[in-house]
Image (tube, rainbow, N blue to C red):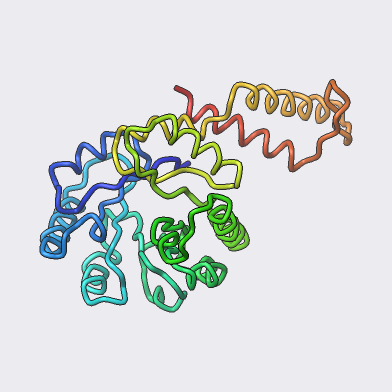
C-alpha cells in the first residue's frame, strides 16, 4: 500500500540514505526539475551508483527528463530494465506511443491539456503502472486559479486510472513545507475526490501525509460496524444485511469497510 512518495534531487547523493530512512513508501530520485542542466549528467551517475549499491528499504523510482529530449532518452537508455529500479516516473506524457518498448513499470505524469485529453489511452498502455497529475505545470498552462476547476481535471484522471485498472491516483506535491495543517486539509480534500497518497518534497511532510489519509475514528467505527454485521449475516446464512439503525448495505459497501479498516491499521500512529 503506497501512501507517501518522497522526491530527492539526483545531484544530492548525500540525501539518498536520509530519504530512504524517512518512512516514505517510495523514494523518487529526481533527474528533471530539481537538477540544474549543468548537473544532469552528474545526477544520472549518482543514481546509477545508488541503484548498484541500493540498501534494503523502500521502493525506488527515478523521474527521468522529458523523453522528447536527448537528455531524457539518455536517461531512459541508462535506466530502463536496471536491477534495483522499481519504477520510472516519466514527465510530460501526452500520448501513449512515447512509452512503447519501456520495460520498467512506468508512472506517467500528466502535465498538460493534451495529457488530460489523452489520459484514458495513456493509462491503458501496458507499460503504465500508475498515473499522476503534474498540477503546477497544468495550472500554469491553463491559467487555473480556482480549486474547483482543478478538481474537475483530477476527477478525469481518477476515472481514467480506475477504468484502466490502475491504483488510485496520488496527489501532487504541496509546496509549503511549513504548513502542516494546510497539507493535511489538502489531503482530506483529495481523498474525498478519490485521490490516494501524495508526493512530498521534504521528509517532514511524510507524517502529515500519512495523517491526512488515515481514516478518522468515526470512519473506523462505522467500518467496523459494517464488517461485524456482514460477519453475523454470513454466519447466519442471511443474504440481506442491515445495521442496527436500519440501514441496509451491500457487498461493495462491505468491501469498502474492509479497506478502511486495513488502511487504518496500515497508517496507525
Does 113 sit left or right of 14 as displayed? Answer: right
Instruction: Establish if 47 lies above or below 191.
Output: below
Residue displayed at 36% across by 64% down: 90
Count of labels shown? 0
**Residue 143's spot in the image, x, y percent?**
46, 62
Q: Quadrant of residue 188?
A: top right
**Residue 69's spot in the image, x, y percent?**
26, 76
Residue displayed at 31% across by 32% down: 204
Residue displayed at 49% across by 58% down: 144
Residue displayed at 83% across by 28% down: 233
Does 184 sit left or right of 26 as displayed? Answer: right
**Residue 41's spot in the image, x, y percent?**
13, 64
Comparing 149 with 27, the one in front is 149
Considering the image in quadrants, where does the C terminus appear? top left
**Residue 66's spot in the image, x, y percent?**
30, 70
Does 158 sit left or right of 231 as displayed? Answer: left
Q: Quadrant of residue 205?
A: top left
Does 124 sit left or right of 242 as displayed? Answer: left
Instruction: Establish if 45 lies above or below 183.
Output: below
Amino acid at each position: 500500500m503506497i501512501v507517501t512518495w518522497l522526491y530527492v534531487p539526483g545531484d544530492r547523493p548525500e540525501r539518498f540514505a536520509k530519504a530512504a530512512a524517512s518512512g516514505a513508501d517510495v523514494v523518487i530520485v529526481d533527474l528533471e526539475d530539481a537538477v540544474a542542466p549543468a548537473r544532469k549528467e552528474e545526477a544520472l551517475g549518482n543514481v546509477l551508483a545508488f541503484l548498484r549499491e541500493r540498501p534494503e528499504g523502500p521502493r525506488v523510482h527515478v523521474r527521468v527528463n522529458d523523453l522528447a529530449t536527448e537528455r531524457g532518452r539518455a536517461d531512459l537508455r541508462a535506466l530502463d530494465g536496471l536491477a534495483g529500479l522499481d519504477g520510472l516516473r516519466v514527465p510530460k506524457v501526452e500520448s501513449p506511443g512515447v512509452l512503447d518498448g519501456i520495460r520498467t513499470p512506468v508512472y506517467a505524469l500528466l502535465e498538460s491539456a493534451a495529457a488530460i485529453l489523452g489520459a484514458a489511452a495513456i493509462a491503458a498502455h501496458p507499460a503504465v503502472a500508475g498515473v499522476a497529475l503534474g498540477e503546477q505545470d497544468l495550472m500554469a498552462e491553463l491559467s487555473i486559479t480556482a480549486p474547483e476547476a482543478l478538481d474537475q481535471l483530477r476527477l478525469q484522471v481518477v476515472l481514467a486510472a480506475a477504468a484502466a485498472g490502475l491504483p488510485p491516483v496520488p496527489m501532487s506535491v504541496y509546496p509549503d513545507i511549513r504548513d502542516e495543517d494546510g497539507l493535511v486539509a489538502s489531503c482530506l480534500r483529495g481523498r474525498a475526490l478519490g485521490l490516494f497518497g501524495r508526493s512530498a518534497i521534504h521528509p517532514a511532510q511524510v507524517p502529515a501525509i500519512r495523517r491526512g489519509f488515515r481514516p478518522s475514528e468515526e470512519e473506523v467505527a462505522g467500518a467496523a460496524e459494517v464488517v461485524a454485521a456482514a460477519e453475523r449475516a454470513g454466519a447466519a446464512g442471511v443474504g440481506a444485511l442491515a445495521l442496527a439503525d436500519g440501514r441496509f448495505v451491500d457487498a461493495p459497501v462491505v468491501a469498502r469497510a474492509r479497506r478502511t479498516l486495513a488502511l487504518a491499521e496500515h497508517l496507525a500512529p
